[in-house]
Amino acid sequence: MYTLQALWTQARQKLDVVNVVFANHIYKILYGELVSVGAQPGKASNACSIWAARVRLAKLAGGMGVESARVENLEGFADVFKSACGRKGPFLIEFRI
């Protein structure tokens, strides 16, 4: 979610940038913080997941004026990445892992 302003700037300035987001849909660092203070994830683990919100960064990028694609495997990523590197303007690849 912190990338939205950067995407808008890239679109506005017509920058040749390829953004890759590895979308694992979890705030894994929060699990580590819970463990480090001796807490059990339990109900608090719901706060660590962003899966329920189904954030689609590729669609958000489009709203900022940045072309995008969503991929779910390495072969798809390789194809889209190669294509994105050969074009003008910003591009975002959302790689669901």
Image (tube, rainbow, N blue to C red):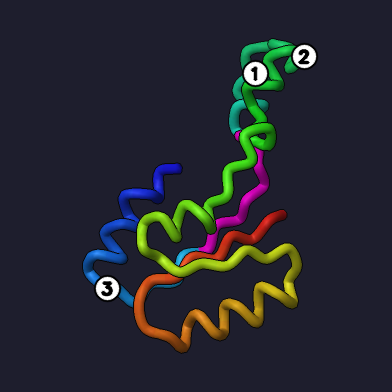
Judged from this view, the residue extending furthest toward the front is 63
Q: Which residue is mark 1?
A: 34
**Numbered range of the magenta stretch:** 20-27
Q: Nearer the viewer, residue 54 or 16?
A: 54
Of marks 1 and 3, the one in the foreground: 3
Residue at 51% from the left image edge and 67% from the top image edge: 68
Give percent across and percent down for residue 62.
44, 60
Residue at 75% from the left image edge and 67% from the top image edge: 73
Task: Name the image quarter holding residue 72.
Answer: bottom right
Residue at 52% from the left image edge and 55% from the top image edge: 59
* Disc on res. 42: 2
Tell me if residue 25 is in the magenta stretch.
yes
Q: Identify the element where label 2 is drawn.
A: helix
* Disc on res. 8: none
Going by the image, does 87 lie left or right of 45? Answer: left
Give percent across and percent down for residue 14.
27, 73
Q: Which residue is mark 3?
A: 14
Q: Amino acid at mark 1?
A: Leu
Q: Amino acid at mark 2?
A: Gly
The tag earlier along the polypeptide, 3 or 2, is 3
Q: Residues within 10 Å of mark 1 (few under 14, many from 20)?
A: some
Question: Does 11 sit above or below residue 84?
Answer: above
Of marks 3 and 2, the one in the foreground: 3
Q: Identify the element where label 3 is drawn.
A: loop
